[in-house]
């Protein structure tokens, strides 16, 4: 049933692109997107394969190898969700079981030769490898479920169970169910997993999800139905053919892609239309990013949050220091001190103004970490927390980026770049930034309390000055 296949394809394709659009540099989101997009391609290939007049043998061979992608990607997603570290060693530990699974499934796919039945030893190898990996990941996920927020935990665990039980690589060759129905059932499980990943990311970023996701979903349904209906009408009039089925999936895929990735497409058009106006292009891009960030704002983002969550949100805000759109969606933009400062200088209480004011508040808190001694840069222990935040975030010093140089940096930032490259391991910088984020969070908390005390007539004290920026430095 090509209509059901198109629906499953569109849903998986949309969710994969949506997760990719949230943050393509986040491993969990990128891997989940690869899994969903890979699965949507399996659905499209299967629908074309069973269409009369297609080269079923060739498409069956392509499909059985393409089916490896979602299994490997989703194993890595489940392992990544249980990974509390951020070290390369942890990443390597995740890659090992994924590599073993990929090799086992490649062997099985080579032996099977095609996705079509009857089931062979190769199909059983694929099923056993994928099922064993999914069961193992599910057990690990259950044991470390505390690392996943409550809103996403149930969705991820239930979807993992169904994905383990409903592996389409075995169901299709056995012929128990039509291939489109087998793929649709597994596609439902994958969409649940994708939703769990989206909930996890929204919690991690301190953002709302429902409004933004619903808008993207509704828009994708509308454009997908608009373009897909034309191919469906053609099939109803002249009959189902390979050309019309291919047209159906390509039309739906392109329509959804343009809708979900509208920002990058708009940037591309701006580069073509305003090639001689870089300032105009930048301003238009910033406005689009800010507009896209507004639905991600939570209604009561910091109400009742504990110290650990507040520190995590502070760490996120610091890492997004140079991205105004991300600061617009940051829960810290709702801090009372932001409203106080805006009211004090008569500025309008708008999202962009709040984001700019949050950036100023963060910059001031970072500056209070600077040791009280002469000079703008130092390498003693007293300087490490200030250096770890000020130069990478405020000054944009990218010491560890591939191909990064000190070109364009001022003399002080150039000194910091040289010091980071030659003296500071990346893991040490990461630890210092986490420790410094705790100090910044304490300072922001103190400012919030100070506002309340000021209203009641009491005398406030500054967080960093009270605790001191001379916290004993952590080891490398």
Image: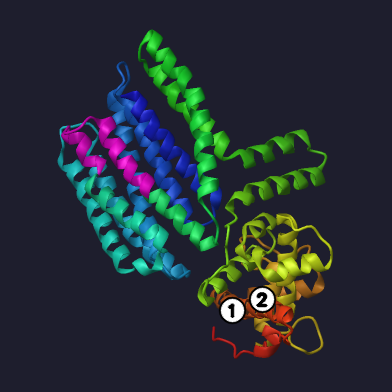
C-alpha span from label 2 to label 1:
15 Å
Measured as percent of width and height from the top left, residue 79 is found at 36, 61
Number of other residues with Cα within 10 Å of mark 1, as a class: few under 14, some 14 to 19, many 20 or more? some
User: SS of the residue at dot 1?
Assistant: helix
Main SS type for the magenta part?
Answer: helix
Q: Which residues are magenta?
A: 167-192
In the image, what residue occupies the spot 57% across and 35% down? Answer: 259
User: SS of the residue at dot 2?
Assistant: helix
Against 252, residue 451 (above or below) is below
Quarter holding the C terminus is: bottom right
Measured as percent of width and height from the top left, residue 332 is found at 63, 66
> Is 254 on the left or on the right of 275, as rendered?
left
Quarter holding the N terminus is: top left
> Is 41 on the left or on the right of 285, as rendered?
left
What residue did someone put label 1 on? Answer: 438
What residue did someone put label 2 on? Answer: 448
Against 161, residue 332 (above or below) is below
Whether pointer 2 and pointer 1 mark residues with C-beta atoms closer than 8 Å, the reply is: no
């Amino acid at each position: 049933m090509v209509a059901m296949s198109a629906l499953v394809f569109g849903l998986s394709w949309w969710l994969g692109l949506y997760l990719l659009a949230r943050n393509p540099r986040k491993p969990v989101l990128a891997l989940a997107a690869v899994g969903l997009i890979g699965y949507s391609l399996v659905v499209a290939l299967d629908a074309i394969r069973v269409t009369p007049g297609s080269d079923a043998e060739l498409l069956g061979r392509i499909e059985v190898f393409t089916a490896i992608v979602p299994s490997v990607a989703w194993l890595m997603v489940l392992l990544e969700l249980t990974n509390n570290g951020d070290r390369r060693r942890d990443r390597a530990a995740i890659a090992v079981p994924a590599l073993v699974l990929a090799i086992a499934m490649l062997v099985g796919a080579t032996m099977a030769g095609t996705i079509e039945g009857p089931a062979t030893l190769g199909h059983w190898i694929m099923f056993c490898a994928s099922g064993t990996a999914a069961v193992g990941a599910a057990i690990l996920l259950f044991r470390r479920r505390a690392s996943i927020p409550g809103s996403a935990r149930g969705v991820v665990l239930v979807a993992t169970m169904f994905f383990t039980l409903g592996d389409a690589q075995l169901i299709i060759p056995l012929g128990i169910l039509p291939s489109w129905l087998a793929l649709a059932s597994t596609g439902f499980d994958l969409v649940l997993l994708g939703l769990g990943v989206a909930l996890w990311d929204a919690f991690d970023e301190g953002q709302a999800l429902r409004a933004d996701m619903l808008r993207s979903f509704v828009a994708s349904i509308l454009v997908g139905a608009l373009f897909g209906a034309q191919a469906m009408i053609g099939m109803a009039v002249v009959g189902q053919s390979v050309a019309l089925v291919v047209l159906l999936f390509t039309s739906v895929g392109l329509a959804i892609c343009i809708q979900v990735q509208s920002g990058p497409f708009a940037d591309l058009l701006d580069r073509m239309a305003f090639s001689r106006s870089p300032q105009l292009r930048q301003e238009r891009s910033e406005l689009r990013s800010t507009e896209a960030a507004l639905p991600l704002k939570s209604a009561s983002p910091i109400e009742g949050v504990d110290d650990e969550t507040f520190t995590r949100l502070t760490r996120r805000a610091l890492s997004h220091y140079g991205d105004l759109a991300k600061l617009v969606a940051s829960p810290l933009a709702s801090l009372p001190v932001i409203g106080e400062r805006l009211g004090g200088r008569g500025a309008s209480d708008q999202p962009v103004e709040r984001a700019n004011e949050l950036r100023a508040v963060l910059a001031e808190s970072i500056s209070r970490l600077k040791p009280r001694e002469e000079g703008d840069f130092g390498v003693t222990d007293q300087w490490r927390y200030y250096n770890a935040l000020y130069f990478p975030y405020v000054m944009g010093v990218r010491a560890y980026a591939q191909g990064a140089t000190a070109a364009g940096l001022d003399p002080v930032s150039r000194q910091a770049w040289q010091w980071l490259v030659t003296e500071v391991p990346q893991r040490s910088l990461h630890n210092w930034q986490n420790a410094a984020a705790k100090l910044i969070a304490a300072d922001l908390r103190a400012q919030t309390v100070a506002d309340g005390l000021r209203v009641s007539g009491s005398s406030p004290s500054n967080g960093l000055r009270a605790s001191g920026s001379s916290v004993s430095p952590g080891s490398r």
